[in-house]
Image: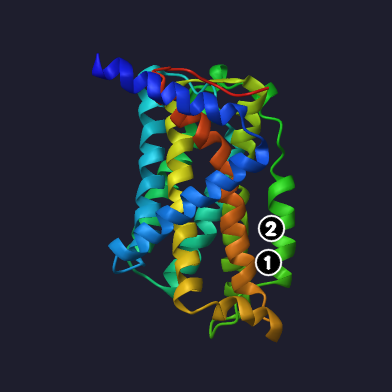
Amino acid sequence: MGKRRGVSAVNMVFGWLRQQSNKVKIALGIIISLILVVFLKFTVRNHNHFFIASELIHATGILILIYKLTRQKTCSGLSLKSQEVTAIFLAVRLICSINMEGDIHTVLDFATLVSTLWVIYMIRYKLKASYIKSLDTCYNYYVLVPSAILALVINPSTSYSYFHRILWAFCVYTESVSVLPQLRLMQNAQIIEPFTAHYVFALGIARFLACAHWIIQVVETRGHYLWLLGAGYFWFPVALIAEIVQTFILADFCYYYVKSVMEGQLVLKMPV
């Protein structure tokens, strides 16, 4: 009885949300996100842990894909192009990490890159018959070329070489839009099976944590990073915008994911 009441209450909440305008939904999403950011700020002392958690959750998402590919023997619903873009930015970030950091981030990036390359191999060769190429319609150069151009124009000012600064900026920009081919495929398919949905939801949580780290940095410096715009230093504000863009790109999907899970639906249906 209690479970039914809980489900009924959830349905009422989502029913109310569906009736609201897009402006109201966006406003509510922003408010909830800010509340979560404030909560994280006061509960997590070392904010560098946000990035570590983000990378771990991303790796967890890859493990979900590996389970899907090995147990179900199908790559239906997965975007090969999105995985290729992911592998590219991970490879670039790994190069930068080896030369600039050499810490736990390097290990996590390496593990995630190897796993992603394995997923690409499975989609391209072992499970090629189940790959729906006709739905994977977002070409990689739509993502990579703008990211490369922006990296040449706006990159961090550090003691590292200009080449490494461009690479770092490129991987930040590319990561922010790497999920677009996957979202495009799901939009074309309309119906998303559970493991693919779990994977994309994991990406959404990972990006939110990374975005929270940047926002908290702005708050703790009392907006100093944003004022750098006036000095002609655009890197930090643009990087922050890139994180926010990716978070909002995934926010809509995460809403429907949570809605489906709360309603007990195993298959996620995207709106037309």
Q: Position of residue 215 (x, y in %)?
A: 50, 65
Element marked by disc 1: helix
Residue 258 visible? The answer is: yes
Image position of 102 with respect to 139: above or below: below
Q: From mark 2 to mark 1, how far is it between C-alphas?
A: 6 Å
Looking at the rendered structure, the number of numbered marks drawn on it comes to 2
**Image quadrant for the N terminus?**
top left
Q: Position of residue 54 (x, y in %)?
A: 40, 53
**Scheme of image coloration:** rainbow
Contact between labelled residues 1 and 2, with CB atoms less than 8 Å apart: yes
Query: How crowded is the residue under tag 1: few (<14 C-alpha within 10 Å), some, or many (20+)?
Result: many
- The image position of residue 89, as x and y in percent, is 55, 54
The tag on residue 44 is none
Task: Give the residue drawn at x 43%, y 17%.
Answer: 265
- For label 2, count other residues whose C-alpha is less than 10 Å away and answer few (under 14), some (14-19) or many (20+): many
Furthest residue to the left? 1
Along the line of sight, which residue is nearer the eye, 11 or 95? Answer: 11
Could you say whether the residue bearing mark 2 is in a helix, strand or loop?
helix
In the image, residue 195 sits, relative to residue 99, either above or below, namely above
Type of amino acid under label 1: Ala
Q: x%, y% of residue 174?
A: 61, 54
Residue at x 69%, y 22% (from the top left corner): 134
Reading the image, the residue beneath label 1 is 151
| Residue 196 in view of the camera | no
User: Relative to 157, is 74 on the left or the right?
Assistant: left
Position of 151 relative to 67 (above/below)? below
What numbered label is drawn on residue 147? 2
- The image quarter containing residue 272 is top right
Q: Amino acid at mark 2?
A: Ser
Q: Quadrant of residue 136?
A: top right
